[in-house]
Amino acid sequence: MEFTIKSGNPEKQRTACVVVGVFDNRKLSLAAERIDRAAKGYISDIIRRGDMEGRLGSTLLLYNVPNTLADRVLLVGLGRERDFRDREYYKAIHSAVKYLNETGAYEAVIYLTEEKVRRREIGWRVEHTVIAACEATYRFEHMKTESSEIRRPLRKLTLSVPMRSDLLIGEIMLARGMAIGEGVELARDLGNLPSNLCTPAYLADTARKLASMYPEIKTQVLERKEIEELKMGAFLSVAQGSETAPRFIVMEYKRPGVKRKPLVLVGKGITFDSGGISLKPAADMDQMKFDMCGAASILGVFRAIADLKPELHVVGLIPTCENMPSGRATKPGDIVASMSGQTIEILNTDAEGRLILADALTYAERYDPEAVIDVATLTGAMVITLGHVASGVLGNNETLVRALVSAGDDAADRAWALPLWDEYHEALKSNFADVANVGGRPGGSITAACFLSRFAKKYHWAHLDIAGVAWKEGKEKGATGRPVPLLANWVLSQENSDG
């Protein structure tokens, strides 16, 4: 979709549709009032008859509104004015764009960007309008022989800003929103692909493609022999049960002249997780194609930052393989040596993500990083802890953890901090190795992060458990692209930090 910025009166817009808001109790927004005055009370009369109450997300399409130049006017419910915050704004935009995409209005000018949102300036509203619009119009029908194609989809959305002086910041944040939106779309596409197509080799090819598109990105793909030479025994123990070969993907984004230490992003890339010998139940196992959404989010972030070109050095590390049962597969009770030299007793082969991440976190040491963040659909326990609302954040540096929570708040991609206290490490003790790979059901997300922390002691590190937010179930089943907005927001915020 094409996005543009402009400033002007809603009643004078010559377009297929103008979008304005109505608050609860039938209160018109300022833009809606302007149209109503030009139309001599036309909208007020309709609202008084009860056609639009202003309920959040509701819509009412009007044709041939008197004394306006637009073919249509779309009224969008904004809910209670005093409660109009991030979530409400996002829902209103999503509802408006989704409705526009189905009405035949191939272009529209949206005035919801002029509405005041608590603590959010015009730049934030522009950026998040674009991201929400991209999400509302996203469709994954790559594998269908007959797509449910929309006859005249929305092709151009113009975002209005209150004053001409807002146009510059509007253009900047428009570009940022488009870059993040495209990064989210890439992550969603990868997550939604079936595992027979989205293999470790496919993820590697995607990384190579990004490198061919953007000169700032360099990609190296290590295959089994090179992984063996690195002595990544934990990673290889997961991969050994599958006929599909593993890959270790190394990406670097760097602007010329950047001297500061790199930020390292590590993504779990299990392209299908059967559980291995500790086989998962059959119900919903199809959803285990989403177990590479951490890897997908790293690729999505690299797409976004390559478009925006911040003055940074960012490294992406993606260990990727399948976790399958076979005669070669790792068995419960086996002990493997990680790249760090620490030995691991594998009590449950379905706790595999932490094993591949352990070696990737050790590999990250060679960059002497400023900070390392790993991203993984790591534990079902995180779904029990935080549901499908927020990612869990744990780490060895409180400043970094707080920065990620704040970045998630600004990105409307929320995260919440959990403790990483010493007492939780007790659950990982092993009689036969340096550490066990599971610590039992109590505090499962925390003990999983405790395991990872053993391989991240030489730098500032944080872990994002995205098991509850990476995909949706039921009627809206599919990858969400989270936490690309959170990660992109955090990475971009580092450009002007002290480092």
Image: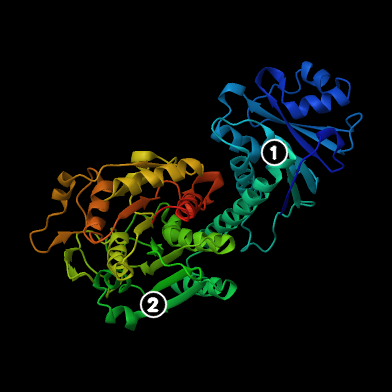
Q: Quadrant of the C terminus?
A: bottom left
Residue 343: x and y in percent read 16, 67
Q: Quadrant of residue 348?
A: bottom left
Q: CA distance from mark 1 to mark 2?
A: 45 Å
Residue 145: x and y in percent read 67, 64
Residue 342: x and y in percent read 17, 67
Q: Are marks 1 and 2 in contact (CB under 8 Å)?
A: no
- Residue for point 37% across, 41% down: 416
Residue 6: x and y in percent read 76, 44
Q: Examine the rendered structure and indicate whether residue 99 appears above or below residue 4.
A: above
Q: Nearer the viewer, residue 193 or 26?
A: 26
**Colour treatment of the image:** rainbow
Q: Quadrant of residue 141?
A: bottom right
Q: Which mark is residue 20?
A: none
For disc 2, the neighbor class at 10 Å (few under 14, some 14 to 19, many from 20) is: some
Foreground mark, 1 or 2? 1
Q: Examine the rendered structure and indicate whether residue 315 appears above or below residue 116.
A: below
Residue 179 seen in the current view: yes
Would residue 230 be found to the left or right of residue 480 on screen? left
Q: Quadrant of the N terminus?
A: bottom right
Q: Which mark is residue 96?
A: 1
User: Which secondary structure, mark 2?
Assistant: loop
Comes first in the chain, label 1 or label 2: 1
**Dot 2 amino acid type:** Ala
Q: Nearer the viewer, residue 404 or 201?
A: 404
